[in-house]
């Protein structure tokens, strides 16, 4: 079936969505959401909005005031600060302390939610890995790490062991997890390289992004049954992922996490998910 | 030659342009500029930005603060107010008292210009009508009328006769034209239906937009040599245009004015005009 090229559809009635970040050159959300709009024949477009840190609030307020902008995705470094730009947030966003989406409600107010962790869990489900009952080791307890750890606990992880060079970050996140999810045993793990008894290893630290970075810990040989996720998108294969693959492990970068959010974005923004995007729905194992 | 659909090119590096209006559902600028970007392989996109009147300044300030927005087109009702949002304006914009484009300069400041009238003159040139030495009758001396009258005078019109129910508007515009363009005889014409000695009749009044509107004056039969322009875009054929065609006149709506601006927009925003768009360059008669 021939479809009209998207830009030929941009007209005065086109509804706007955007991803707010700084920088934005690395973002993939416009490509994914625009493919969704194209497939569904929705007259909407998702743009990158490069919002400098020093003018974050007035710039986002300006975008929110547009009569034809329906929602924003929020990325680094604005996820915590974005909470101040909405009138209400979800329980998940409240627990994580950050949002990565906001939409305008019918009454004109703005509502925020956080799908980063949900996206990772859905992406793992799509790859055939069920988090329920599993023992997780997570490196990095910062902003992204908080969203991921909360989602893993929500999805029924049996335990989450947190390692972070900033030990107080790991302690605070561990305490919050134990408060909110009695079924999930969260703890601080001072030995980041230890993966004994671990089913899922997730890197939420930035180590591996910069050229010359090694692995985020001095890992030995992984058992082949270990599932490894590095949420870093660029480079596509970090030293950790290369090591995991050499050990015969299933290993993936952050792309399934972003793709896993697409269904959540669609539902949040009220966009019908075309059947051709069922692979992103996260409903099948 | 096969080209990629535009939206497939929207990524984190895409530069943003927009047209600011209220409403914006009727605008054609995104379609024209996006075709230009497509043809030239430019990674940029033009969006409609619906900016409510009561939040005009902070909303435009927010758009201007985006790190990846390079310029804005301005349409009704914001053209006069937009002057307050730029640091400097062109001589044309100063004479007209309004802008319809703004761009960010390399030093970070914003510069505004006004191409509405230039677009009309270029559109007429493209249709084979040279304004130089011609006698013009213009109905409507408001914002759009001012831009058109200044451009006609700049293009060498021998005379411009202005009719407006708000007589003081016609008088003020006439006085400004006579001050700036000694070679063009501007005057107020209290008989809007009189086209004796007129080569070009331009309607810049809103009469003809609303269903049930008749012509903006009680015209008799036009001489077939009269060129008629109605800058109204919707409906595509106003009662005035229908009458002109019945009289055998060359008659056109506002589309050549918008198309005629495309080359000016491209130059203003520093976009290379692909050869396939030479028809819009306004350089040939």
Image: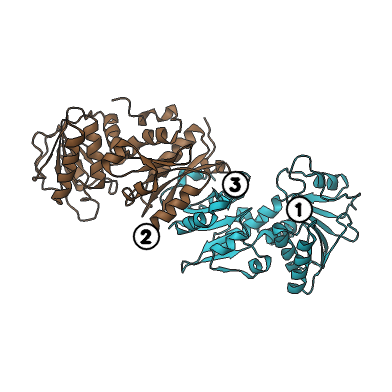
Chain colours: A cyan, B brown
Q: Residue A221: x and y, percent?
A: 91, 49
Q: Residue furthest top?
A: B284
Q: Are marks 1 and 3 in contact (CB under 8 Å)?
A: no
Local packing at callout 2 (Cα closer than 10 Å; few below 14, some 14-19, many 20+) is: few
Q: Residue at x 37, y 46 (%)?
A: B74
**Residue appearing at x 8%, y 41% in the figure:** B194
Q: Are marks 1 and 3 on the same chain?
A: yes
Q: Position of residue B49 (x, y in %)?
A: 43, 51
State the residue position of label 3.
Answer: A24
| Subunit that carries the residue with mark 1 | A
Q: Identify residue for label 2.
A: B54
Ranked by sequence position, the earlier of labels 1 and 3 is 3
**Residue wearing tag 1:** A205
Marks 2 and 3 on same chain: no
Q: Are marks 1 and 2 on the same chain?
A: no
Q: Is residue A69 above or below residue A111?
A: above
Q: CA distance from mark 2 to mark 3?
A: 30 Å
Question: Which is more toward the observer, A109 or A56?
Answer: A56
């Amino acid at each position: 079936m021939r479809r009209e090229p998207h830009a030929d559809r941009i007209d005065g009635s086109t509804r706007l969505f955007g991803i707010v970040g700084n920088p934005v050159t690395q973002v993939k959300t416009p490509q994914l959401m625009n493919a969704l709009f194209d497939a569904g024949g929705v007259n909407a477009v998702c743009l990158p909005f490069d919002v400098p840190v020093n003018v974050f609030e007035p710039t986002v307020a300006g975008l929110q005031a547009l009569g034809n902008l329906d929602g924003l995705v929020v990325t680094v470094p604005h996820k915590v600060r974005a909470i101040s730009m909405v009138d209400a947030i979800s329980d998940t966003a409240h627990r994580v302390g950050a949002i990565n989406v906001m939409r305008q409600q019918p009454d004109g107010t703005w509502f925020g939610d956080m799908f980063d962790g949900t996206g990772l869990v859905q992406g793992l489900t799509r790859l055939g890995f069920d988090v329920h009952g599993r023992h997780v080791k997570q490196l990095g307890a910062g902003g992204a790490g908080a969203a991921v750890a909360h989602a893993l606990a929500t999805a029924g992880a049996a335990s989450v062991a947190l390692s972070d060079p900033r030990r107080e970050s790991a302690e605070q996140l561990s305490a919050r997890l134990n408060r909110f999810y009695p079924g999930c045993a969260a703890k601080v793990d001072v030995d980041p390289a230890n993966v004994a008894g671990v089913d899922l290893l997730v890197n939420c630290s930035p180590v591996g992004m910069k050229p010359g970075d090694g692995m985020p810990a001095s890992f030995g040989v992984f058992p082949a049954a270990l599932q490894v996720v590095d949420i870093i998108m660029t480079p596509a294969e970090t030293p950790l992922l290369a090591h995991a693959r050499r050990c015969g492990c299933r290993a993936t970068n952050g792309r399934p996490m972003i793709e896993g959010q697409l269904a959540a974005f669609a539902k949040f923004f009220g966009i019908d998910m075309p059947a051709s995007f069922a692979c992103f729905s996260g409903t099948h194992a």
